[in-house]
Amino acid sequence: MKIIFKTIRENIFTPWGLWLSFLGVLLATALVAGLSVFWFGLSITNLTDIVPWGLWITIDLSSIAVAAGAFSLCAIVYLFGFKRYEPIARTATFIGFTGYSMAMMALLLDIGRPDRFWKSFVYWNTHSLLWEVTMCVGLYFTVLVFEVMPIVASFEWLRKKFPRIAEKMEHMHHYAPVLAILGLGLSSLHQSSLGAVYGVIKARPIWYKPEMSVMFMFTAILGGVALTLFASMLAARLTPKAKVNDILVERVSQVLGYMMIAYLYWRFWDWLAQTYTYEPGRTEAFKLLTSGTLSFNFWFGEMLFGALIPTIILLYKPTRLSPFWRMLGLAMIVGGVVAFRFDTNIVGFLTVISYLPGEAMISYTSYSPSLVEWAAGLGIIAFGLLAFSIGVKYLRVVDHRLTSEEYETVHVMADDAIKA
Amino acid sequence: MVIDQSKCTGCDQCNLACHAHNDINPELQWTKVLDAGELNGEKVYLPRPCMQCEHAPCVEVCPVGASYYRDDGIVMMDYDKCIGCRYCMVACPYDARVFNWKEFTGENPAVPEWGEPEVDRRPRGVPEKCSFCYNRIDRGMSVGLVPGVDAEATPACVVTCPTGARIFGDLNDPHSNVSLVLKKHPSYRLRENLGTNPRVYYLPVREDGVVED
Ligand code: SF4
Ligand code: SF4
């Protein structure tokens, strides 16, 4: 006990100690908030029958989105054979694992009967997109558990105390290509059907469009890759434990820049299609985005700082080569994706469509999360930051000196195919 | 169910009977009586129960199948299976579902001293909605009564309506009371363009103010 106190006393005022204490405070607050939600029920949130999904669902959607770097980069490395990028895939896998854990926490808070969460795996309505999402998220999380095993195996303490287990976990790395295929399949299924969860809702015309699923998939890949790169670069600046290979990061950033052009192109046509004719409900909802309460989010969060400026930063060579500007650009993309998910979710609720005949059809409502929602939500984010920090410090999550040799030799079929 | 807007006076008795029969939290409503504007200086009302949609979005989206169809078409809720994700509320085009944000404890002011609710209270954390009083229908039919004709086999709101604005019956039977009314009078349904095929029809108020029967 004494030793523990002594270590705490000695380390608390180091940057690491302060950072941990800051996260600890957030987590403790969130714990109180979370427990009170379980105890008092959802009535202590600002959710209503009109706005039944709020901040937590945004966090859920966003953390799943930015976790998508895992499957995209794993596929690139293990299936398409770009082995050079393996260290980045390692970072992405860890972020993916963290992101999905965050998403599941958010969901557990959000459902009215957390005690029955297991029923979503036992009782199946295969027609429901939410069923599909639940199953895929559950299965993919299992895949991620296997994928992070070799990473966790690099924990010094584990290696010393339980060398056998660590070795077994390390061994998982041999299955990386198989896991990558599974991950790719499951992720592409649920990342897109997460969009379709909204896209099939006829009652809310702003959502009801087939490209919803494609948009979710696309933004997930953008946000996921951007976050992986940003987090790697940030870690490398803050601690000597993290090492990045700037050439790799710069390459991927450039590709990301080109993908952003495709994204902008897409958004342009989406915008045109949404505004071209009057459609009751949809037009009003779109007005809310472009000139109503959500307009700041939309124009600045999603468009200007979320898409246009980062595209320029990542494609213009001098800014891309500068680590500062590149990091800024990457962070903006992540912000843009989060803004997109937030707006998409909330706009459908804030536009209330009357079913009365001959009435003025549309009215707007408002929603702002309650203190409890913020506290619990920030706690979930703090959990993500904590997991990543620990990963960087103890698990060499960001270490671009790692090459495949360190995992012993791995021969991948896809690799051969590329050489041929 | 057919609801005759020319007869509805907005008295809210249906809502009260619904609360008493189904033991509903006073803060929630299964059947709302909404203001629907004015015609010739008279107020028009629109009572709105669950539409018991034939293609019910709530049933389609429920991940665990807690919302489901009965064979006769009534859209049911399995309150023990529901995980409380509220996707059905997001999907319902008629706001027919209300969520139990709180536990409902204590007295129900709608329940009279001489009676008892016939339906169990729902727990906290699940949405609930109008069930067309399926338990009244089932019990009545089991002793040979006809829903819509015999009060004991008919939803509480229909029985209680003082002006007879609600008519209940079997839409699949071309000779039932509801089918005949719909044949005789023009009717409409809510948000028909969505293709949900609601089983609640409305007879609009006539311009000339004539009340038909
Ligand atoms: S009105 Fe709503 S709750 Fe009722 S069946 Fe239709 S979609 Fe379901
Ligand atoms: S809240 Fe319950 S009934 Fe509604 S979709 Fe979710 S599980 Fe189904």
Image (cartoon, coloured by chain):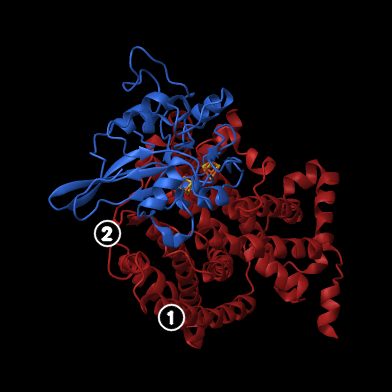
What amino acid type should be assigned to the residue bearing mark 1? Answer: Phe
User: Tag 2: Cα neighbours inside 10 Å, few (<14), some, or many (≥20)?
Assistant: few
In the rendered view of the protein, which quadrant contains the N terminus of chain A? top right
Q: Which residue is mark 2?
A: A358
The chain containing the residue under callout 1 comes to A
Q: Quadrant of residue A136?
A: bottom right
Ligand 1 within 8 A of label 1's CB? Answer: no
Q: Against A142, is B155 above or below? A: above
Determine whether, in the image, residue A112 is placed left or right of residue A44.
right
Q: Which residue is mark 1?
A: A268
Residue A184 lies in quadrant: bottom right
Please report the residue visible at 52 percent of the width from the left and 39 percent of the height from the top. Answer: B84
Question: In the rendered image, is residue A88 in sight?
Answer: no
Which of the pair B101/B12 is nearer the observer? B12
Q: Nearer the viewer, residue A326 or A77?
A: A77
**Chain A, chosen colour in render:** red
Give the residue displayed 35% in from the left and 44% down from the top.
B3
Picture coordinates of residue B65, whole percent (x, y) = 61, 43
